[in-house]
Amino acid sequence: MPEELTFDPSTGLIRIRAWGDEFITDWVASRNEILRLNAANGANRLFVDAREMVGVPSVLDILDFGDAWPENVRAAILIGKGTPEDVMFLDETATHRHKPIRVFYDEDEAMRWLQESP
């Protein structure tokens, strides 16, 4: 899996670093771990560094993934100029579904958003 997930219990922040080609199975496996950390530790903030991604799941998979995202976990996704544009579709899907997922180009802005009250 081209993802690395870490959790800092002192801050309650979950981090994912994603690179290379991403498949929906990778995203679902990470979401399952996030849900486990949320249930066990109350972790409800996720920072995803997706600047090194080169391929993403299909648009339909992204739509389904966004629909199934938990409403109590805020996710900030950091993208770069080389990140596939389909990641922005997740932000659009989340907005329309009232899910707390946002895409950012600036890490500081993403971290500020994660600290805000929902």
Image (cartoon, rainbow, N blue to C red):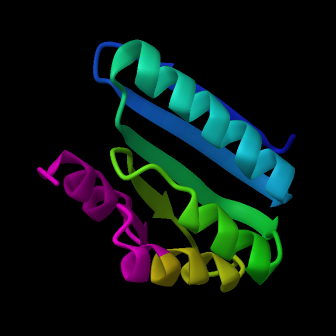
Q: Which of the 4 quarters of the picture holds residue 73?
A: top left
* Residue 48 percent across, percent down from the top left: 53, 51
Q: Residue visible at 77% across and 70% down?
A: 61
Using the image, determine if residue 30 lies above or below residue 51: above
Q: Residue visible at 23% across and 58% down?
A: 113
Residue bounds of the magenta highlight: 94-118
Quarter of the image with the C terminus in it: bottom left
Q: Is residue 37 left or right of residue 26?
A: left
Check if residue 104 falls in the magenta segment: yes
Residue closest to the eye, 34 or 47: 34
Using the image, determine if residue 58 lies above or below residue 114: below
Total numbered labels: 0
Using the image, determine if residue 39 lies above or below residue 19: above
Q: Residue visible at 44% across and 21% down?
A: 39
Residue closest to the eye, 80 or 58: 58
* Residue 83 percent across, percent down from the top left: 68, 75
